[in-house]
Structures are given as structure tokens and as C-alpha cells.
Amino acid sequence: MLSLNKSIKMKKLLLPFFTLLVFAGLLSLYSCNTSSSTTLPGSWDKLGDFDGITRSGATGFVIGNYAYMGTGYNYDVPTRLTDFWRYDPQIDTWIQMASLPSAAAPRSNAVGFALNGKGYIGTGIGGSDINNPIPLGDFWEFDPSTGPKGSWRQVANFGKTATYDTALARFGALAFTAGGRSFVGGGYNNYSGLKDLWEYDQANNLWIQRPSIGGSKRQNAFVFVNSEGAKEYAYVGGGNDNGSYVTNFFRFDPTLLSDTTQNPWFELNGLTGKDKNGNAITQPRSRELACAWSIAGFGYLSCGSIGAPQSDTWQYTPPVVNSSGVITGGDTWIQYFSFSNNTPTIGYARDSGFGFAIGSYGYITTGKSGTRRLDDCWAFNPLGVEPDNK
């Protein structure tokens, strides 16, 4: 397999050609699996392992050209974690940063997002009794500019508004930043699934309630934010609602929040594993605890759990919507190459991993496969690379 640096150079050269192939439906790029007859596009490069403790349920965010990841569940002890790390994809290196302060409970299944150069981590499962998780509602701000390790400070509890203060504690929520605005919602609070949505007002350190997430209540859902022209949309799907996998899939437009006559949530083709006519599999099945990211105007979904860990990977083409609100194109999925079929190094199918994108690549690290907690790291190239023997 080509090195990651060589793959990056090839990506830049082939990007216009690749885009034409996607829209024409003529994808025939090589995969990394040289011993298989698969023609699925894309490829995975095995990177150096994560330096910290193996874990599942970690969270984090991306600021600039660095990814930040921390917290999670250490199955071996077992215990929840507060450590925090920075990943530099240019040199494939992890550096330990300042851990969450002692006032912050160790946690897993929290959420993270970045806003205006700072990162935020909050909610999640806490408590010393592993079998009786306590939902958390506190939030913490990370400033990477304060010293070599960065620093943390506590900000408003999730749901704290100008008129009342409540934690709205939960775990398995989702978080995203779109159009320069950050949102947290959904999850589970030990009694019920949730679908409420809140925006963080960074300037005033408050939370503002927004129209609830479309469709079902959901915990452990996936979300990716996609740039389309001058706008950014968030796409939310999957998750679990009272033991059932949620199939509805929605696009969120933050610019519509100022228009009380329009719903910012727009329903798309559901994640049923079949097309709208019920024909053969043309899209991913719904799942929970998956990884998702966006590259060059396309969304990507990988791994997760459908009763068992998965490793399939899919590319999503955004919808084309006319002035009447009718989808006239796009809203389609293409299956991509899975790293569990990779050669010569095979990756574990997993859920509860940490996925993110920097530049032209997607990344997956940590997670769990059954009782196995993981620390391997993978880079996803949607273009694929030509095998060395070609």
C-alpha cells in the first residue's frame, strides 16, 4: 500500500477526475484489498496506534489541522477516563494534553464540538459505579492556545438559559457546529430517549433551545456537517430509540432558525438498507455508535453497531432540492471499501469509535469490538490508491 503522504499527493491530483466519476456513477478505482475481487472504491491506511489507554466511547473535536480526543471507557480496569490528546496527521503523532480538571467527573459517551478556536466537551456517563451510570450535564471549554498542553475551564451546564439553570443531564447525545453555530441534542437520561436541540451561545455562556431533532427520539446517533456552496448543513441519522434502530434521516439548516415559518429539519430518504422502492441494498442500514465525517462536499458513514460491530463504509451525496422543496437529485449512498477487508493489515469491525476528518482524509480510532477495546488508527482516502503491484 502507498504511504499516507503519497496518498495525499495522489488525492490532490485526482480530485477533479474523481468528482466526475461520482456524478456519472462510473466509480472503478482500485481498493487496497489486492487479494479480493471487490470493486468498491476508497481505501484505508493503517496508521500508528493511539498512544493512550485503549478505550471506547471517547469524544473530541477538530481545531485547525489537529484533532483532539479524550475521555471514554477503559474496559480493562474498568473505569472512565479524563485524559485528553492531540493528533497531528502530518506526522502521525499523538501528544497528551491537559486532562479534564479534577472537578470534572470521568466520563464516556460524552459529546464534543469546536467553536471559534476553542473546544467543548460535556454530558456523558459518569459515576464510580460502572453498573449504575449517572448522566452528566456539565460542560467544559478547552483553549489550545494557553500553553503547550492547553487549559480547561467550566462553562454553563447544558441547558442553562438566562432564566433558569438545569443540567438536562444525558449521555449518547450528538453535537455539531454548522454555519459558525454549535448545537447539542438527543441522547438518553436514564429514563427516556430525547430529541431536544440546544444551541450554545458562546458570547453569553448560555444555551438556547431550538426546534427538536426531526423524527424519532434517538441516542447514539451519528451526525456530519457538509459544506454545500455558501452554506453548511448538518445531517443526522441512525441511533437507538427504545431498543429499535432509528431509520429516519434529516438535514438541518441553521439559517432557517431566524424564520419561524420554516422547519429547519428536512427529511431525506430513510436508512432502511433498501431504496425507496424496497429493492436491493443501495444504502446503509440504520445503526448506532457509528463514525461519520465529511470530505469535499460528501458525507461518510462507517462502523457502528447493528446488534454486532460493523465495518462497512458509505459515501453520501447531498440532495438537490428545487424551489418547491422537492428532492430532484442526490440523496443517495454509495458503498465504499471496509477496513475489515483490508490487506495486508485487517482492522476490527467496531462501534463507539472516534471518527473525524482533516483535509482530504477521514480518520477512525479507538472503539470496541465485542469486549475488545481498541487503540488502532486508520486513515480513509475516498479516492483509493493504486496497489504497489500495479
Image (spheres, rainbow, N blue to C red):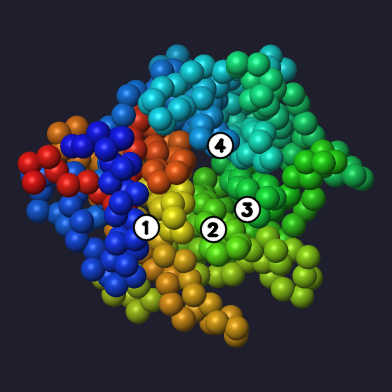
* Residue 348 in sight from this viewpoint: no
Secondary structure, mark 2, is strand
Residue at the farthest right position: 163
Q: CA distance from mark 2 to mark 4?
A: 16 Å
Q: Which residue is mark 4?
A: 64
Amino acid type at mark 3 = Ala
Tell me what residue is drawn at x 19 percent, y 32 percent: 345
Q: Which residue is mark 1?
A: 315
- Mark earlier in primary sequence (2, 1): 2
Eye-nearest disc, 2 or 3: 2
Eye-nearest disc, 1 or 4: 4
Tell me what residue is drawn at x 46 percent, y 51 percent: 294
Pick the front one: 203 or 284? 203
- Choose top left, top right, bottom left or bottom right for residue 3: top left
Q: Which residue is mark 3?
A: 178
Secondary structure, mark 3, is strand
Tell me what residue is drawn at x 66 percent, y 24 percent: 145
Mark 2 Cα shell of 10 Å, populated few (<14), some (14-19), many (≥20): some
Residue 318 percent across, percent down from the top left: 47, 66
Secondary structure, mark 1, is strand
Disc number placed over residue 227 in the picture, else none: 2
Q: CA distance from mark 2 to mark 1?
A: 15 Å
Quarter of the N terminus within the rendering: top left
Secondary structure, mark 4, is loop
Residue 373 percent across, percent down from the top left: 37, 26
